[in-house]
Amino acid sequence: MRHNVRYTYCEMLFADYLTTILTPLLKEPGVLHVITSNDQMGVLLSVQIAGTDMGQVIGKDGETAKAIRTLLRVMGGHQQARVAIKFLEPEGGKFIKIITN
């Protein structure tokens, strides 16, 4: 039972840290939702953001998302917890390719 209490604390810690990292990147920070869950594999943070902010958070070639995952993985190591992040597709999640001349 103590193990579950620890993960609950870690979930809150990781969710708060992720929110702190993501908020300055977003044009619509009010839409940000971080959903936490855990299992025997560790803590999963599912991130919901506005579709217009998805490109900013993912970054060119996924570099921003990779950096965020690295930061949380390091933080998880300090708490002896495995952390994974999943960026959820926005509602009506059709990706629009913008073509410029």
Image (cartoon, grey):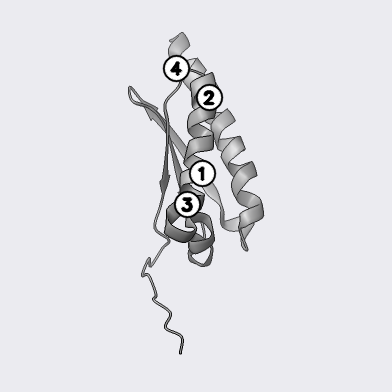
What residue is at 53 percent from the left and 62 percent from the top? 53
Q: Are marks 1 and 2 in contact (CB under 8 Å)?
A: no
Q: CA distance from mark 3 to mark 1?
A: 6 Å
* Residue placed most toward the observer, 92 or 95: 95
Q: Pick the quarter of the image with the C terminus.
A: bottom left
Q: Position of residue 61 (x, y in %)?
A: 42, 58
Image height of 28 relative to 94, above or below? above
The residue that label 1 is drawn on is 67
Q: Residues within 10 Å of mark 3 (few under 14, many from 20)?
A: few
User: What amino acid is found at the position of numbered circle 2 in the picture?
Assistant: Cys
* Residue placed most toward the observer, 61 or 21: 61
Mark sitting on residue 63: 3
Q: Are marks 3 and 1 in contact (CB under 8 Å)?
A: yes
User: What amino acid is found at the position of numbered circle 4 in the picture?
Assistant: Asn
User: What amino acid is found at the position of numbered circle 3 in the picture?
Assistant: Glu
Q: Earlier in the sequence, mark 2 or mark 4?
A: 4
The residue that label 2 is drawn on is 10
* Residue placed most toward the observer, 70 or 49: 70
The residue that label 4 is drawn on is 4
Q: Earlier in the sequence, mark 2 or mark 3?
A: 2
- In the figure, is residue 36 to the left or right of 24? left
Q: CA distance from mark 1 to mark 4?
A: 28 Å
- In the figure, is residue 33 to the left or right of 61? right
Image height of 95 relative to 37, above or below? below
What residue is at 39 percent from the left and 76 percent from the top? 97
Q: Residues within 10 Å of mark 1 (few under 14, many from 20)?
A: few
Q: Pick the quarter of the image with the N terminus.
A: top left
Q: Nearer the viewer, mark 2 or mark 4?
A: 2
